[in-house]
Amino acid sequence: MEKESFLEKAVRAVEDMKGINISIINVENIVTHMDYVFICSGTSDRHVISIAENLKSKVKRSAKPFSIEGMDDGNWVLLDYGWIIFHVFREEVREYYRLEELWRNGKFIEASHYLKDVLPKKVLSSA
C-alpha cells in the first residue's frame, strides 16, 4: 500500500477514537530501519488500548504489524509495521518519555495534511 494512503487511514483511525496530539515524524533521513514515527495520546489506559485496536483494525487490509507491545496495561502501546512505528501513550507517560525530542531532527508533518477532504468546508455568505 502507498505510504500516504496508509498514513491517511492511520490519522483517521486515531481521529475516529478521539485520540489527541498526533505527531507524525518523517525520519527516513535520520535512520535506515524506518521512515516514520507516529505518536498520539489517549486520556486513559482504556482509551489508549481502544485507539491502538482501532489503528490496527483500520490498516489490517494493508499491512500486519511485526510486533505489538503494551496492550495489557495501556500506558504505552507500540505497533511496529517496519517502515512506520506507532506509539500510543497516556498523556502523562508521553510527557515523561518525550519521544518528539528524540526525533527532533526529523521532518514533522501536520496530521491535518491527511484530513483535507474531511474538514468542514467554509460556507460563503452571499452579500
Image (cartoon, grey):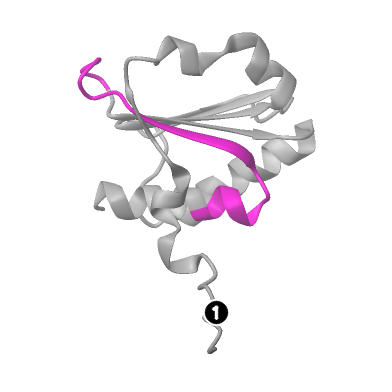
Where residue 120 sits: x, y (%)? 54, 70
For the residue pair 62 and 29, the one nearer the viewer reads as 29
Whether 94 is drawn above or below 9: the answer is above
Identify the residue shown where x is 43% and y is 41%: 110
Is residue 28 among what the camera can see?
Answer: yes
For the residue pair 109 and 4, the one nearer the viewer reads as 109
Whether 103 is drawn above or below 48: the answer is above
Disc 1 marks which residue? 123
Whether 126 is drawn above or below 92: the answer is below
Disc 1 marks which amino acid? Val
Is residue 60 among what the camera can see?
Answer: no
Specify whether residue 14 is painted magenta.
yes
Q: Is residue 56 left or right of residue 105?
A: right
Identify the residue shown where x is 50% and y is 73%: 121
Q: Is residue 29 left or right of residue 90?
A: left
Which residue, as the protein is rendered here, is positioned at the far bottom? 126
Identify the residue shown where x is 69% and y is 44%: 50
Where residue 115 sits: x, y (%)? 45, 58
Q: Which residues are magenta?
A: 12-33
Where residue 82 sits: x, y (%)? 32, 30
Q: Is residue 83 left or right of residue 110?
A: left
Identify the residue shown where x is 69% and y is 17%: 93
Specify whether residue 103 is painted magenta.
no
**Badge 1 density bin: few <14, some 14–19, many ≥20, Cα 10 Å:** few
Where residue 63 sits: x, y (%)? 36, 47
Secondary structure of the residue carrying tag 1 is: loop
Identify the image quadrant of residue 16. bottom right
Q: Name the quadrant of the C terminus.
A: bottom right
Numbered label tally: 1
